[in-house]
Amino acid sequence: MKKEKWFTPANVVAALLVAILIISASVTATLFDRHGYYALRDKLDLPGAAGMGEAELTENYDALIDYNAVFFQGPLVFPTLPMSEAGRIHFAEVKAIFASIQIALIVSAIGAALCCVFLLRKRKVRFLALGGILALAIPAVAGSVMGAVGWDRFFVLFHQVFFNNGFWVFDERTDPIILILPDAFFLKCLESIVASIAIASILLIAASALFSARRRGAPE
């Protein structure tokens, strides 16, 4: 049986689409994982720390998450909390990033599905492993940087890379929403994204290896 090549044009394109799909899906799933936030809310007693009731806290958090949905139209309005102009600008910038990721999810899902149909019909599976390996580069790099500089410095570096202003440094007096978004929340989000990417990537690499092994063992 002829050995399948790794780096054919079709494999590379498919692998890139698969990697983008894994990463964008992991970020999007973490963004909309409200139950994960609710569990952290209860664990850290965020209502008590923020000086508001649980229902009020949840209502304001849900407004922020709804706003970040790609198809949400309209300005961000917190039901009970004030917001500064700097805060409004920062959240608009954050929404633009999340909207781009969600669009990438939709486009890559369609592209990856078409590539899967095309390549799997030809019994080509290397693109699955290649896509998983490419996606794993993200948590590997993030983990290496965070391990080298620590979480606090990593958090600052992240914002300096993605935002060209200081609006992400919130003052709780003018933007009390920051009281319900502690550092532990952002760390949990990063851990969730990295774990999701790693699990999906490993499963694809394993699936590719399994399919390849079965194909090698099949009669000519």
Image (spheres, rainbow, N blue to C red):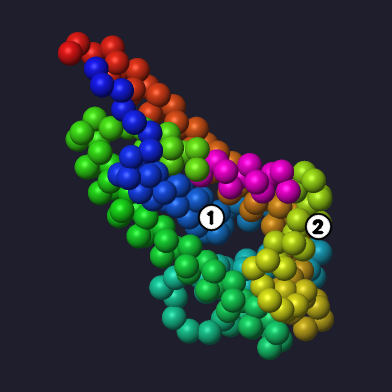
Q: Considering depth in this image, is 201 or 49 the residue closer to the camera?
A: 201
> How many angstroms separate mark 2 from mark 1 (CA)?
21 Å
Q: Mark 2, mark 1: which one is toward the viewer?
A: 2
Residue at figure coordinates x 44%, y 27% from the top left: 206
Q: Is residue 42 visible?
A: no
Q: Amino acid at mark 1?
A: Val
Q: Quadrant of residue 216?
A: top left
Q: Which residues are magenta?
A: 135-145
Q: Position of residue 17 (x, y in %)?
A: 39, 50
- Residue at 53%, 55% in the rendered image: 27
Q: Position of residue 137 (x, y in %)?
A: 57, 43
Does the magenta portion include 142? yes
* Residue shown at 74% from the left, 62% from the top: 157
Which residue has dot 2 on it? 153
Residue type, label 2: Arg
Per the image, the residue denoted by label 1 is 27
